Image (cartoon, grey):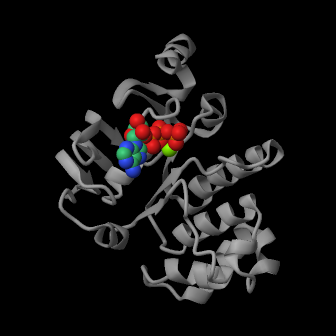
Amino acid sequence: MFNVKGIRSGYGEVTVLHGLDFEVKHEIYAILGANGAGKSTLMKTIAKVLPLKSGELQFKDEDVTHLTPYQLAERGLAYVPQEQNIFPELTVRENLSIGGLVGKRSKQERMEEIIELFPDIAERINQKAGSLSGGEAQMVAVGRALMQDPVMILLDEPTAGLAPKYVDGFFRKIKEIHEKKGVSIMVAEQNAAKAMEIADRIMLLSLGTIFLIDDCNNVDIGKVKEGYRI
Ligand SMILES: Nc1ncnc2c1ncn2[C@@H]1O[C@H](COP(=O)(O)OP(=O)(O)OP(=O)(O)O)[C@@H](O)[C@H]1O
Ligand SMILES: [Mg+2]
């Protein structure tokens, strides 16, 4: 699905990611690591929001190294940033509608599916997105991404800032999106234990390099802990 070779990226002169190689299949792939490990930088880089310093990206067997974020979206990649992932001045309906600019099926049909998945946002559909709670806003952000009918979604810490009692429910939704809609998911998450409950595989980033890639059925917990200590 996504094939990443030797990517380096960062901000200005500063290099944050130091040559990462990995492959994401049709699965839930969690990107773990402590604050500042480079999770968001990785998400931005493969969504092409942040320029590559070097390396290659292949999406569905096509070289997408030089494509724009919009061209990637047209090919089925949806990206939900960690912050500022909704338009607060627009209504929930308008936010969802923007996602529907990509893709072919009728917007109405897609919007009905999103509301079925996140019934809580139905009654807020005409409300400004900026007036929603943190959890509702995240549903809208994920809903907007799903409106693109993506084959893969990049979710950057979707449960950050959510009250603990909502976190499990949100993770279950992510699993449901993968299983029922057949969408591959790459999710950045600080909480390794939570991520491993739903992920098929994990990548642990430490100081902008890959510390560990492992199968969730068989994770070396000691090694995960070590990756967070550095
Ligand atoms: N816009 C920016 N300009 C300069 N440096 C940045 C910028 N954004 C992030 N960095 C730096 O890049 C490094 C990696 O940050 P990144 O946001 O990718 O980490 P993260 O793993 O997503 O952390 P968190 O769990 O806190 O979201 C950090 O050292 C950070 O200070
Ligand atoms: Mg981050």
User: Residue 218 appears at what percent x and percent y?
Assistant: 53, 20
Q: Position of residue 193 (x, y in %)?
A: 65, 28
Residue under the point 69% across and 73% down: 130
- Residue 28 visible to an observer of this rendering: no
Choose between 36 and 193: the one closer to the eye: 36
Q: Which of 121/36 is in front? A: 36
Please give the name of the residue rendered at 32% of the width and 40% of the height, measured from the top-left corner: 23
Residue placed farthest to the top in the image?
222
Q: Splitting the image into 4 quarters, where does residue 191 fall?
A: top right
The residue furthest front is: 13
Image x and y of residue 16, in percent: 31, 37
Residue 225 sits in quarter = top right
Relative horizontal placement of residue 212, taking residue 224 as reference (left or right): left
In the image, what residue occupies the spot 68% across and 75% down?
129
Residue 202 percent location from the top left of the image: 48, 32
Is 14 placed above or below 110 here? above
Q: Is residue 168 left or right of residue 27?
A: right
Q: Is residue 201 visible?
A: yes
